[in-house]
Amino acid sequence: MSRPSEGRSPVASIVSSVWSLIAVPLLAVLMALVVGAVVIVLSSVLVLKNPFDPTLPLTAYSALALGAFGSYDSVVSTLVLTTPLLLAGLGVGIGFRAGLFNIGAQGQFLMGAVGSVAVAVWFAHTPAVIAIIAALLGGMIAGAAWGFVPGLLKATSGAHEVVTTIMMNYIALAVLAWIVIGPLRQPGSVSPATPSVGVAALPIVLDRSGHIGIFIAFLAVPIAWFLLFRTTRGFEIRAVGANPDAARYAGVKPRRLIVLTMSIAGMLAGLAGATTILGVTHQMNTTFSTSVGFDSITVALLGRSNPIGVMVAALLFGAMRAGAGPMQINAGIPVELVDFIQALILLFLIANVALRRLLRLRGVSGAEQTGFETITRSYGGETTG
């Protein structure tokens, strides 16, 4: 951690604090783009047998940026893709703050989607406002329940959340298949699929695809920030994540906080699933899948588990997803490049200690309570129970 210098102006202190937080994520993104540029050039020459073109990475990244922000429709598409990443990323980030490595956002997302569809079908003949609110709440409750289980197991038996959340992901896939094939199957459908959410579909407020869930996601950012940094419960969550023994000595009950935090994380991931179903796809089939749950882990790490940072990271990932298609069409670069760059970002983030030492980044904060320490402690076998 950087130490305040005597005589330093307030502006310099703020700049130093901001740089301390964003240095590693910013460098991780820049280095991933550089390595991605090298791969673009080498693959063009060695695989496609094209002439050497040093400007190809610039062409690819320009097409990617224009695909994400080059028009009003592109911006709306970016925001739509950002919405579930932001909500699920906030959930994972809050878990990191409590020292919990929640890999279950994928299952929580799926169960949130299932819960919202089930409630939407049940409320099919009610006014739209009631149906929408009920479906969103159904998704949140289903996601929270899917987070509650591993939280309870960790609090009561010490079962590691990494193991239990991975298991819950597979159970969620099985439940999804059973629900779509059985109780929620659309009568007369050729292939198993649920009925449309009908009146519970989220209203379109931005062009053709910009549903109101976008605003719900961005509204969740200040709420999460206020919870973490301006409430007693948020302080307890951060205290348990920093030092569970000290928190217990101060009167905090870590086990109760573990269950609460995992439930909140599941609720946010479930809300991400609900907004996706109610705002985008409007129904589910047995092959319904998404990478949001796993991408949200990288989003939380890149955002340093700070709600504002998570918002910026989610926007970055949403922009890359939105620009991937236009990049392939206009620059001839496969959409898989985006997955490769995101994987590189995660790699450089995980290697943040080596990155700071290699680049001699003095005064740059390390891993504490931003997710990196939680991952290290998780694989080191320590628990917070």
Image (cartoon, rainbow, N blue to C red):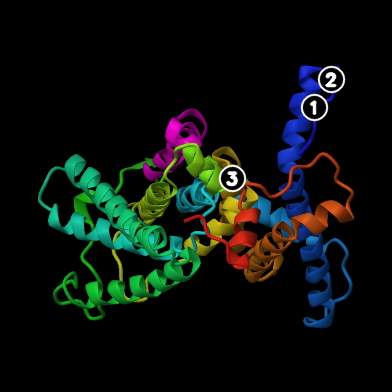
Frontmost of labels 3 and 1 is 3
- Say which label, 3 or 1, has the lower sequence index: 1
Give the mark toward the camera: 1 or 2: 1
Image position of 301 with respect to 195: above or below: above
Q: Which residue is mark 1?
A: 4
Front-lying residue, 122 or 350: 350
Q: What is the CA distance from the residue labelled 3 to the residue labelled 1?
A: 21 Å
Give yes or no for residue 217 being in the magenta stretch.
yes
Residue at 73% over, 53% down: 29
The picture places residue 374, in percent across and down from the top left corner, at 60, 56
Residues rendered magenta in the picture? 212-235
What's the residue type where badge 1 is placed?
Answer: Pro
Q: What is the secondary structure assignment of the residue under circle 1?
A: loop
Q: Amino acid at mark 2?
A: Arg
Residue 301 colored in magenta in the image: no
Q: Are there few (<14), some (14-19), or many (20+) residues within 10 Å of tag 2?
A: few
Q: Which mark is residue 15?
A: none
Which residue has dot 2 on it?
A: 8
